[in-house]
Image (cartoon, grey):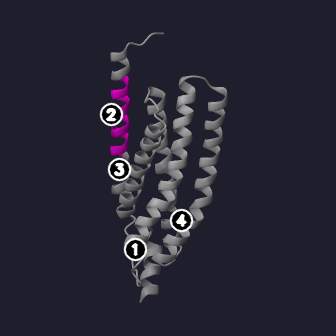
Amino acid sequence: RTVGPSLGADNIKIGFHSTWIGFTAIAIFMIAYYQLFGVFSVAALAVNVLFLVALLSMLQATLTMPGMAGIALTVGMAIDANVLIAERIREELRNGNTPQAAIFAGYDRAWGTILDSNITTLIAGMMLFLLGSGPVKGFAVVLCLGIATSIFSAVVVSRCMVNLIYGSRHRLQTVSIGQVWREGAEKIEKDAK
């Protein structure tokens, strides 16, 4: 029932470290699996966490364990959006689309799924805020803010980076997005010749 300040500080420290360990593990996996698009995803994820912490700082929110849990959940949800985009781009490449068309279609077609999943989570977060009390409300606030920053970072920030790297190339032959099934790659090579 009663938590002293030193135990509370230890919990915050442990929660902070667990979030960074999770972030690092996600970063390693994304870069290994999606190559350059993994780098874009990790950069967008870092921007997401930065925006979330900045919003919490602007609101002068105290970082508690439920808040740390909200940040950890936000990190997981933010990377989910990037995985949806990358897999959609891979699918378009497998279908034989050119790299530029695959990137455009990947972002365009993943948007609906990203929006659906985040809106349903936002509704759950709002209900937690309305019906919960104390720590549950703190978790709900961080979750709702995290969803807003997640959508922005996954779609806008990562797309800006992709356009910065690939957008200026007129004859783009390949994209660094990990292994695409052989048939799609062979079809792209045949079309390029």
Q: Which of the image's four quarters has the C terminus?
A: bottom left
Of helix, strand and loop, which one carries label 3? helix
- Mark 1 lies on a secondary structure that is helix
For label 3, the crowd category at 10 Å Cα-Cα, with few meaning under 14, some 14 to 19 and many 20 or more, is many
Q: Is residue 108 left or right of residue 10?
A: right
Look at the numbered discs 2 and 1 and tell me whether their residues touch, using CB distance below 8 Å. Answer: no
Q: Which amino acid type is shown beneath numbered disc 4?
A: Tyr
Amino acid type, label 3: Ala
Q: Residue at x 53, y 67 (%)?
A: 106
Q: Quickly name the residue at label 2.
A: 17
Q: CA distance from mark 4 to mark 2?
A: 32 Å
How far apart in space, not on screen, are marks 2 and 1 (Cα)? Answer: 35 Å
Dot placed on the residue nearer the N-terminal end, 3 or 4: 3
Q: Position of residue 95 (x, y in %)?
A: 53, 73
Q: Which residue is mark 4?
A: 107
Q: Give, as a single range, the part of the protein colored magenta.
A: 11-25
Q: Are marks 1 and 3 in contact (CB under 8 Å)?
A: no
Q: Residue at x 47, y 76 (%)?
A: 100
The residue carrying pointer 2 sits among few (fewer than 14), some (14 to 19) or many (20 or more) residues within 10 Å by Cα, namely few
Who comes first in sequence, dot 4 or dot 1?
4
Judged from this view, the residue extending furthest toward the top is: 1
Q: Main secondary structure of the magenta part?
A: helix
Which of pointers 2 and 1 lies earlier in the amino acid sequence? 2
Left or right: 102, with 178 as reference point:
right
Seen from the viewer's position, the closer of residues 153 and 166 is: 153
